[in-house]
Image (spheres, grey):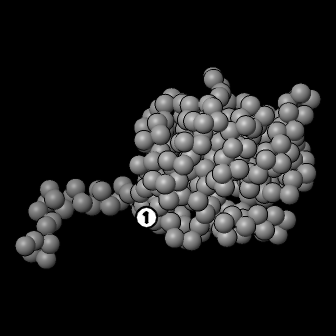
Amino acid sequence: MKKIKKIINKKNKSKIVCLTAYSKNIAEEVDKYVDIVLVGDSLGSVLYNYSTTRKVTLTEMINHSKSVRLGVKKSLMVVDMPYNTYSTSNAALKNAKKIIKETKCDAVKLEGGKKIIHQIKLLTKNKIPVMGHLGLLPQSTKGKFKSKGKTTKEINQLINDALLLQKNGVFAIVLECIKTPIAKQITKSLNIPTIGIGSSVHCDGQVLVTDDLIGLNQTNIKFVKQFLNVKKYINVGLRKYASEVRSKKYPTKKHSY
């Protein structure tokens, strides 16, 4: 709970940095710079080329989270509950307990507001830390992804859902692809932090898929900024290796038994 209190206390003080990780090696590096490491069900598209996060299984999430746990030492580790694992309150509690027990993560994340409030209420009642997720909900969205907060109905629902999530014990809320003025309004109206993705600088923190920002995963999503092209460096190493094998420069005696 100390890690969660630390995140909450950052509200209005310092920006929260969050990135995804799906393996120990990436988690070790990400952990050095972030406050939250998220094992996102985005691994479905990034690693498995699934057309939707709905195809991600509980087993896949747990296995990747076990690997990530080995690399996370200081950050808060949050795991996405995959599609159809929290369709009822009992299922949510059973699967959340399973995720936490098997992965040793610090919290779980669920997508939605009023529709899943009974599930969230049961989890928090059982002292399971929950991160919320509003706006664009990949597990619920069919077809092209669109930003949220355009109509009065959408705006009112987003604000009401955010307040409802806070009331029922979530410690932070991811705001995905929500129009800037609405994301700003929600952030100001809450006592808990908001973590933005495509929802402007006005959120209390930001999250991105690590593979996207380092250029390992090619995407044209509007909110993604590529901070590095890691493929360039990978290719240098691979080209050199292939060249030395073919020219018999590798392995030398130094690399042989």
Q: What is the number of callouts on the image?
A: 1
Is 62 rendered above or below residue 45?
Answer: below
Give coordinates of residue 181: x percent, y percent: 89, 44
Is 130 rendered above or below residue 74?
Answer: above
Residue depicted at 11% across the width and 62% down the height: 248
Is 74 rendered above or below residue 102?
Answer: below
- Which quarter shows the C terminus? bottom left
Local crowd size for mark 1, using a 10 Å CA cut-off: few (<14), some (14–19), many (≥20): some
The quarter holding residue 255 reads: bottom left
Is 54 rendered above or below residue 216?
Answer: above
Residue depicted at 46% across the width and 65% down the height: 71
Residue 99 visible: yes
- Which quarter shows the N terminus? bottom right
The quarter holding residue 52 reads: top right
Residue 227 visible: no
Give coordinates of residue 58: x percent, y percent: 47, 40
Residue depicted at 70% across the width and 50% down the height: 124
- Left or right: residue 60 compared with residue 206: left
- Left or right: residue 2 compared with residue 21: right
Residue depicted at 78% across the width and 57% down the height: 193
Q: Nearer the viewer, residue 56 or 128?
A: 128
Give coordinates of residue 43: x percent, y percent: 49, 43
Q: Residue furthest bottom?
A: 254
Give coordinates of residue 46: x percent, y percent: 48, 42
Name the amino acid type tagged 1: Leu
Secondary structure beneath label 1? helix
- Left or right: residue 61 compared with residue 256: right
Which residue is the site of mark 1?
70
